[in-house]
Amino acid sequence: MELIEAIRTRRSIRKYDSSRDVPKQTIEEILELALNAPSAGNRQPWRLHVVRNPSLKKALCEAAFGQTYIEEAPWVICVVAVPEESGSRYGDRGRNLYCIQDTAALITYIMLIAREFGLDTCWIGAFDEEKANKILGLPAGQRCVAMLPIGHAAEPRKNRPRKPLREILTYHE
């Protein structure tokens, strides 16, 4: 699959085929490639927690207000921001903005690379961050900013309407 095809076919999948596993090596290949994501000043203010343990996935599901597809997917990638790694160079703007932008870039890379591997994901941001941080055993100063279930879709992808470019684009020439 080419990048453009991965972009065109990526969808937020909320039902995973629990009978189809994904090898750990595949997850590592995806994450290794995703580390090429850009970050302000190349600070790379992120950590990755990859969860397969069923009881931890259940706890993450509960922290995410019952989004059960967290438990269905064979893996859940939790993307963690380390604000001080950006803040040490860029101050408050780094702590409050750049580290979030940087982790968002990493998340996007993970999702698109997963599609390249024929896998599906869903970017979950709706969860109790304090609970997720505790479940993952994060040290003070680190924060889980996204959960990404990853696996094979159990249902066909559905196209979602997108605003036309002309509706959201402004040129300043």
Image (spheres, rainbow, N blue to C red):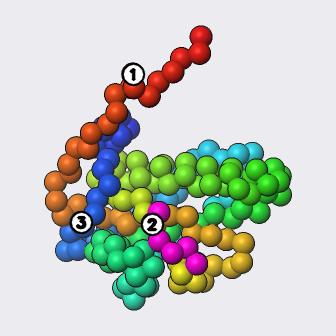
Residue for point 71% across, 56% down: 96
Which segment is the magenta one? 125-130
Query: Of the numbered discs in the image, which one, if any, rests on residue 166?
Result: 1
In terms of secondary structure, where does tag 3 sit? loop
Name the residue beneath numbered marker 2. 126
Image quadrant for the N terminus? top left
**Mark 3 residue crowding within 10 angstroms, few (<14) / some (14–19) / many (20+):** many
**Mark 1 or 3, closer to the camera:** 1
Measured Cα–Cα span from mark 3 to mark 2: 17 Å
**CB-based contact (under 8 Å), mark 1 and mark 3:** no
Picture quarter containing residue 168? top left
Which secondary structure class fits the magenta region best? loop
Residue 103 place in picture, x, y as percent? 58, 55
In terms of secondary structure, where does tag 1 sit? helix
The correct choice, above or below, for 15 with respect to 173 in the image is below
Is residue 106 found inside the magenta-colored segment of the image?
no
**Mark 1 residue crowding within 10 angstroms, few (<14) / some (14–19) / many (20+):** few
The correct choice, above or below, for 76 with respect to 26 in the image is below
